[in-house]
Amino acid sequence: MPAKSKAQQKAAGAALSAKRGDAKKSDLKGASREMYDSMSEKQLEDFAETKHKGKPEHVRKTD
């Protein structure tokens, strides 16, 4: 599933980095921390590698 915004893509990249051991889990905050806890490495890869051309910076969260 591709990221819907640039912010979501960046958060996934940060979570993926921590999941791989390249960054500290304790450095994650907000959305990236939630993604780290709830998503697999493959899911994070899919979000992080999304092309960001034409993506908005942020998308409102809908419940």
Image: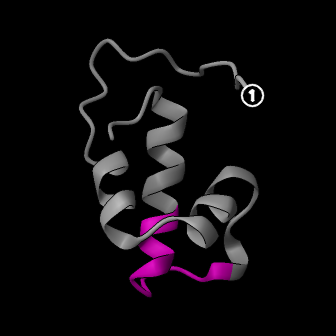
Classify the position of the C terminus by image quarter: top right
Say whether residue 37 is magenta: no
Q: Pick out the residue farthest to the bottom.
A: 21
Place residue 26 in its image quadrant.
Answer: bottom right
Image position, residue 40 (x, y; %): 42, 70
Name the residue: 24% across, 31% down.
51
Q: Please, is residue 61 above or below residue 7 in the view?
A: above
- Residue beneath label 1, please? 63
Name the residue: 70% across, 23% down.
62
Span shown in magenta: 15-25
Classify the position of the N terminus by image quarter: top left
Question: Left of 23 or right of it: where is 63?
Answer: right
Question: Left of 3 or right of it: where is 59?
Answer: right
Name the residue: 48% across, 45% down.
10
The tally of labels here is: 1
Q: Residues within 10 Å of mark 1 (few under 14, many from 20)?
A: few
Image position, residue 52 (x, y; %): 31, 27
Say whether residue 19 is magenta: yes
SS for dot 1:
loop
For the residue pair 47 and 52, the one nearer the viewer reads as: 47
Image position, residue 35 (x, y; %): 58, 60
Question: Left of 4 or right of it: where is 59?
Answer: right
Q: Please, is residue 42 above or below residue 10 in the view?
A: below
Q: Pick out the residue farthest to the front.
A: 63
Name the residue: 69% across, 73% down.
27
Q: How is the image coloured?
A: one colour
- The type of residue carrying mark 1 is Asp
Image position, residue 55 (x, y; %): 39, 17
